[in-house]
Image: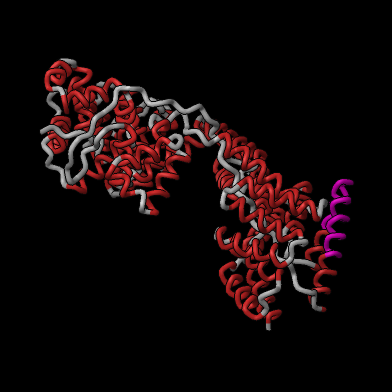
Amino acid sequence: MADEAKAKGNAAFSSGDYEAAVRHFTEAISLSPDNHVLYSNRSAAHASLHNYADALADAKKTVELKPDWSKGYSRLGAAHLGLQDYIEAVNSYKKGLDIDPNNEALKSGLADAKAAASASFRSRSPPADNPFGSAFAGPEMWAKLTADPTTRSYLDQDDFRNMMKDIQRNPNNLNLYLKDQRVMQALGVLLNVKFKGPTGGDDVEMQDEDAPKGPETSKEETRKPESEPEPEPMELTEEEKEAKERKEKALKEKEAGNAAYKKKEFEKAIEHYSSALELDDEDISYLTNRAAVYLEMGKYEECIKDCDKAVERGRELRSDFKMIARALTRKGTALVKMAKCSKDYEPAIETFQKALTEHRNPDTLKKLNEAEKAKKELEQQEIFDPKIADEEREKDAVDLFLVGFTILSTWDYGVAVTQNRGNEFFKQQKYPEAIQHYTESLRRNPKDPRTYSNRAACYTKLGAMPEGLKDADKCIELDPTFSKGYTRKGAIQFFLKEYDKALETYQEGLKHDPQNQELLDGVRRCVQQINKAGRGELSPEELKERQAKGMQDPEIQNILSDPVMRQVLVDFQENPKAAQDHMKNPQVMNKIQKLINAGIVQMR
């Protein structure tokens, strides 16, 4: 019964169903609790689910039952590595190598653990580009949180401690937790600043000393452990032995195909790879190798078919992503070879991009860049090709009457037609199609601010705010007197609740067009929103959201980490005379206003 449950577990593991594998191995363990292989297998399944604590417990039991078995230490090392306990991982792999010095899995695991330990050591200090990094550095953080009566109570909460540990490991993760008022309270304690919360509260004193700076660190991330090797297999059945023999024969055929390929005996190579496929259809390398031969022979259609089969079969078998990426790259290469016009490059570029999502290979990236460059060059040639222009003129003759001005050249014609089409699609609320035509118009005339304005409007309708903001900025850059650029940009910033920035944009636009009603309305809306924060009229949820958004703003972060401004805030709380002097300084009051608008400070 235990062997049957174990076999089910092995099958589930091999198919990638790790949760089922855990269930079957657990059943087998209940029937045979002293079988070390079962604990080893279940440890591998837990690790594949990233349940490293459970994987560690099973690995320890494996070593306890069979201390002279090297694979137990491999499981132990992998579990420690997953828990980022790199020292213990290194020690575990070393113990396994003491038993089996030639074990490749242990050697590989030891190398990964050492590399991860080295990277972890280099990244312990807070990143230098985060102004709050020093606040979370070292044991001083925990001492400050313990000393404060409010945050001391938070330390009894597991989720709060985990958040603070995560921020201490990487202060850039602070942005992930800013909506949690406990984190805001803790940040205030660490910076000696009292943030105004939704429920009010008293202010605390701010120190004027500079916070200690942490050393600069590398941005290299800790390497994560690779996926676990297969569990210890059962004794082979007759069917399994036959399958193994077929695989061995298939590998020999593959080797013969490789040898023929190197000799440029392509027909023979294809025969050998085809024979390997007949013997074993669970190895997609036979397909990708045969595709490579077809590519060399110029049989691009056959190459593409083999690559498609390799990708489809690879996904069914859960093959290594690098193999799938290789098939996609080979297909993209064949498509490039077949390309005759700029549009023919589009499927090749898409295929290369898919390959890079599977595995970021430098060779694939190079091929993608070359394909994009070739497509762009062909597009330029096609734009100036009189034959293509004549065809477009005949096809779009009706559009000429809609344009409303004289066409001076083939270039002007193309710009006019594409702009007109974009406008028509915009009126029909077909924004993706409108973007396509505006983009084509910009390709022909990249210095037209109105087209950038129109495309920004499309992006805004689709909720693509970063793209819309970029186009609005470009519009203003090309023509600083064009008011539409400012209304587009201000509307996006207002939608993003960046009311300060939106107000500045609208005011800048009014310098060029003082009577523009859209700009005037924009200023009025921004002032209303900003005044709500100044008068304390925001709801608790609105205040929390505005504080979190403000704390993500680099300008707000720099203000709060500036020792001069920290002293100014202390004076506003404790020294009215000094506060009056500060209010005479326009730069200081500008910064105070930004903190008020962000909901960090409230005036009473």
The reply to whether residue 274 is visible in this rendering is: yes
Q: Is residue 452 visible?
A: no
User: Majority secondary structure of the magenta segment?
Assistant: helix
Q: Quick one: 144 or 450, which is closer to the camera?
A: 144
Residue pushed farthest front?
Answer: 147
Identified at 61% across, 43% down, the residue is 360
Quadrant of the rendered structure where residue 333 is? top right
- Find the residue positioned furthest to the bottom: 1
Q: Is residue 262 magenta?
A: yes
Residue 254: image location, x then y, percent? 83, 57
Q: How many marks?
A: 0
Report the colour scheme.
secondary structure
Residue closer to the observer: 493 or 512: 493
Is 88 magenta? The answer is no
Nearer-the-camera pick, 279 or 554: 554
- Tell me the residue at 63%/45% (across/down): 87
Residue 238 x/y as whole percent: 82, 78
Residue 168, compared with residue 562, is above or below; it is: below
Q: Name the quarter where the N terminus is drawn.
A: bottom right
Measuring from the top left, give residue 184's x and y in whole percent: 30, 41
Q: Which residues are magenta?
A: 248-271
Q: Residue placed at 47% from the left, 35% from the top?
A: 389
Q: Is residue 503 left or right of residue 265?
A: left
Q: The C terminus appears in which quarter of the rendering?
A: top left
Instruction: Name the side, left or right, on which 581 lies relative to 451.
Output: left
Residue 504 vs residue 538, the one in the foreground: 538
User: Could you tell me which residue is drawn at 35 percent across and 28 percent down?
Assistant: 474
Residue 29 appears in which quarter of the rendering?
bottom right
Q: Is residue 499 above or below residue 74?
A: above
Residue 70 drawn at (x, y percent): 76, 58
